[in-house]
Each structure stands twice: as structure tokens, then as C-alpha cells.
Image (cartoon, coloured by chain):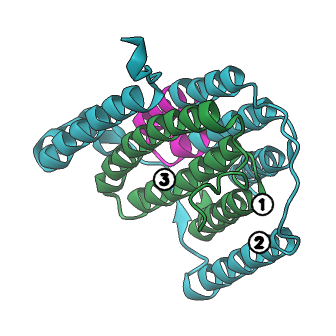
Chain colours: A green, B cyan
Amino acid sequence: MSGVPLVYYLILAVIMFSLGAVGVLVRKNALVVFMSLELMFNSANLLFITFANFYKSLNGQVLVIFVMTTAAAEVAIGLALMVAIFRSRHTIDVDQMNSLKG
Amino acid sequence: MTIDLILFIAVALTAIGAAVAMILSRNAVYSALFLILNFMSVAAFYLVLGAPFIALAQITIYAGAIMVLFLFVIMLLGAEKMKEQDPVKWQRPAAILLSLAFAVEGTLAVFKKLDHSIYMNSLSGALADPASIGELLFNQYALPFEITSVILLVAVIGAVVLSRVEKKEGAK
């Protein structure tokens, strides 16, 4: 079985990361911005797994577990922040969050 | 074209299509569901690359726990449909252009630098075994593992503190 070239996996990860960056920069709904961040985490994880396979080492897979738990913590805090912001400002549009502006 | 390559391209197109649809959806609930589709297809890649434990953790943690949290918050805030206007007119085209440049640059760098004849094969035996991941996690990575638990504890406390309704001083 010949399999798939390593390069294809890397290109897929690059494309997914760029799409996540577009989502972060373009969307105004803070929740969708968070989802795009998850997409970027996901592409980094795909790279870790790909190279774990390439180097026949399990360290990459263990790092993915750490990335996943950190992402989970980040999402929990981020969504709690979202709820707190929505309570005081009644919107989660990232352009409306400018009360610290001088 | 081998059957592996055809399957890879099909799943990769699903992943990319789901990511694009997530960005383009006007409704945040649809965005969340498309992101779940993307996570599922990436989990399929993990499975092919010989990481069954990570693939199932991806589905249970990401597609299960995290996205359910997202959907709860979307419905709690009623933020599924939001009128989006941009005050900075040039931001959207500039963002798309810069990200496209990044994608092209990354693809070219990968294409030029790396050998195209390196093929991925699925792992077998001890390397694909969850038991060996556990062994590594609790021996070599024991300290980072403990630190992760502290991070999660801080996140839980932070989430509770941030989402608590503040009582007025006079109400007591």
C-alpha cells in the first residue's frame, strides 16, 4: 500500500489554518471568531499527528492531548467572557466592544 | 490514482468545504454544525495516520463537549443571527488577501522544500496503541500533565466567576 504523500497533509493543514485566519479577521460575531480559532488549533493538531506518524514517535500525539485540554480551557473562559459581555452590552459584535477606547 | 489518494482527496475536500461553509454561514448554529463536520473529517485523518486514541478523543472532546458548549451559548445569547456591518471598509478584502498570500506561501514552501516521494503509512502495533500513549503521558510527561490539570481547574473557577450574576450592594 503506497499511501498518500506527506506534502498533501501539510498543504491541507496550511489551507485549514489560512481559512481559520480569514474567519478570525472577517467575521464580527465573536462566537464565530472563536470557532475559527478552534479551526486553527485543529490544523496545528493535524500537523502534530502527521509528523508523529512520519517520525514514528508518540510524542506528537501526547502534545495533541495537551493542545486539546488547553483549547478546552480557553473555550470555557472565552464563552464565559462572551456571556459576561453580552450581559452588560447586549451584543457580542466584536466591533461594539470598544468601551476601553480612549 | 490509488484508492488511498482518492479517499484522502474526498475527505480533505469535505474538511475544507466545511471550513469555508463555517465562515460563510450567516447563522452561527450552522457555523457550529459545519465545524463539527470539519472535526469529524480531521478525526478520520487521525485514524488513517495511526492515532485512534486521538481520533476518538477529538470526536468526544471537540465535537462532543466543546461544540455542545458553543451551541448552548449561541442559544443562551440568542446570537445565531447577527447583522454584520463593517465600519472599516478595507478590512475584509485585506484580510482575505493576506490569508490567501499566507496559504500560497505556505503551500509553496512545503512544495519546494520537501521530498514528494515521502509517503505516509498507517502505523501498527505498539505505536498505534492507546496504552503506550498512556505510558508516555504518565512517565515522561507527568509534570506537564499535572500542570494541565491546574489549567483546567483555573478555567473552571474563571468560568464560574465570570458568568456569575453580580448582586447589588444594597440588595443584601
**What residue do we see at 55% from left, 50% from top?**
A42
Q: Residue B128's quadrant in the figure?
A: top left
The residue type indicated by label 2 comes to: Ala
Asked if badge 2 and badge 3 are on a common chain, one would say no
Residue B132 in sight? no
Question: Which callout, 2 or 3, points to the residue nearer the camera?
Answer: 2
Q: Which residues are magenta?
A: B44-63
Where is residue A46? Give x, y as percent. 53, 54
Check the residue under mark 2 and report the chain it is in. B
The residue type indicated by label 3 comes to: Asn
The residue type indicated by label 1 comes to: Val
Where is residue A59? Give x, y as percent. 29, 55
Q: Give the mark, 1 or 3, whose residue is nearer the N terminus.
A: 1
Is there CB contact under 8 Å for labels 2 and 1? yes
Where is residue B53? Give x, y as percent. 40, 34
User: Which of the labelled discs sits on residue A26, or is there none?
Assistant: 1
Question: Which callout, 1 or 3, points to the residue nearer the camera?
Answer: 1
As measured in the structure, the alpha-carbon distance from the residue carrying label 1 to the one carrying label 3 is: 23 Å
As measured in the structure, the alpha-carbon distance from the residue carrying label 2 to the one carrying label 1 is: 7 Å
Left/right of residue B22 with respect to residue B126 in the rendered view:
right
**On the image, numbered disc 3 is attached to which residue?**
A45
User: Which of the labelled discs sits on residue B95, or is there none?
Assistant: 2
Q: Secondary structure at mark 1?
A: helix
Residue B154 in sight? yes
Q: Secondary structure at mark 2?
A: helix
